[in-house]
Amino acid sequence: MVARLEGDTRRRALAGLKGWKEEAGRDAISKEFRFADFNQAFAFMTQIALKAERMDHHPEWSNVYNRVSVLLSTHECGGVSERDVDLARFIDTLGA
């Protein structure tokens, strides 16, 4: 069972993420990314998709031309877990 992050553990984990925000009305974190064009945005999403599949942990996201919106939450625990933090860290290494 995956545990939801709470209290000080949650605050510390989220404090280490640059630009991610807690989503209003949901126990989730989100971030918006902008790219020069659609090809760069799609390449970014492809890299995330490959990692997410290996993790068996998939984001909720949308893409409009050069913008990608990513929302992370763990369905098994009904909120933000260490899986979300790990995937967010990976996403931030992609240099968006």
Image: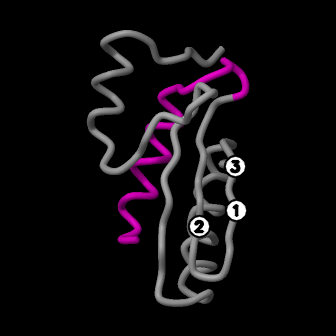
Earlier residue among tags 2 and 3 = 3
Q: Mark 1 — residue?
A: 62
Find residue 68 and name its label.
Answer: 2
Residue at the (44%, 12%) spot, across then down: 6
Along the line of sight, the residue nearer the viewer: 24 or 87: 24
Q: Quadrant of the N terminus?
A: top right
Tags 1 and 2 touching, CB below 8 Å? yes
**Residue 76 spot, x, y in % from top left:** 72, 22
Would you say 63 lies left or right of 15 here?
A: right
Amino acid type for the residue under numbered disc 3: Glu
Amino acid type for the residue under numbered disc 2: Val
Amino acid type for the residue under numbered disc 1: Ser
Rendered image quadrant of residue 12: top left
Q: Is residue 49 above or below residue 24?
A: below
Q: Magenta part of the protein: which range?
A: 75-96
Question: Is 58 inside the magenta-drawn segment?
Answer: no
**Residue 54 spot, x, y in % from top left:** 64, 51
Disc 1, SS = strand
Q: Mark 3 — residue?
A: 60
What number of labels is visible? 3
Tags 2 and 3 touching, CB below 8 Å? no
Disc 3, SS = strand
Disc 2, SS = strand
**Residue 18 spot, x, y in % from top left:** 30, 49
Of all residues, the one furthest to the front in this rendering is 24
Q: Is residue 58 above or below residue 41?
A: above
Would you say 56 lies left or right of 29 here?
A: right
